[in-house]
Image (cartoon, rainbow, N blue to C red):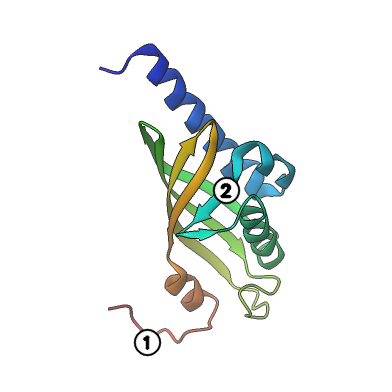
Amino acid sequence: MANPAELETSERHMSIARRWFTQGWAGNLAMAGDIFSEELRTNGVHVGVAGPVARIRDRLTGFADLATSIDDMFVSGDKLAVTLIWRGTHAGPYGGVPATGKPVEVRDSAIWHFRGGKVTEIFTLQDQFAMLKQIGYLPENVHAA
């Protein structure tokens, strides 16, 4: 059984993640410096605080009506795992694809590593293939292996 300090840390980490996925992904990007370290690496690449800010800014350009729901979240030690779904209408350019006006629903998973109260490493996995099919960039008859 976890001790009270571990439980408090776990709750704090989950609260930070919830804030980012609800408020940050809604456009409150100023909070990024409180959440992410300048040493932040995403999928092995150093991105610093600017990385998540640019990612969400791009996503909000492509999907101004972006809405996110967290499916599952858990913490083990200094790591947090989250699965979520984001939805929106492709109303602006995203990933080099001009707006199509089509709705999307994308599954996303992430593992965050906390150190010193901030996120220092993120591993993400997003279903880009499904998103590209939904906006019509890939034909419907193309399937993932």
Task: Place residue 8 in its image quadrant.
Answer: top left
Q: Please name the residue shown 38% across and 12% down the image.
A: 4
Which residue in the protein does label 1 denote? 141
**Who is closer to the viewer here, 33 or 58?**
33
- Residue 135 percent coordinates (x, y): 55, 76
Which residue in the protein does label 2 denote? 39
Left or right: 35, with 10 as reference point: right
Q: Nearer the viewer, mark 1 or mark 2?
A: 2
Q: Quadrant of the N terminus?
A: top left
The three-letter code of the residue at mark 2 reads: Glu
In the picture, the disc for residue 129 is: none
Q: Please name the residue shown 41% across and 39% down the image.
A: 80
The three-letter code of the residue at mark 1 reads: Asn
Q: Is residue 122 above or below residue 116?
A: below
Q: CA distance from mark 1 to mark 2?
A: 41 Å
**Who is closer to the viewer here, 49 or 8?**
49
**Who is closer to the viewer here, 72 or 53?**
53
Q: Please name the residue shown 33% across and 14% down the image.
A: 3
Left or right: 98, with 84 as reference point: right
Q: Quadrant of the C terminus?
A: bottom left
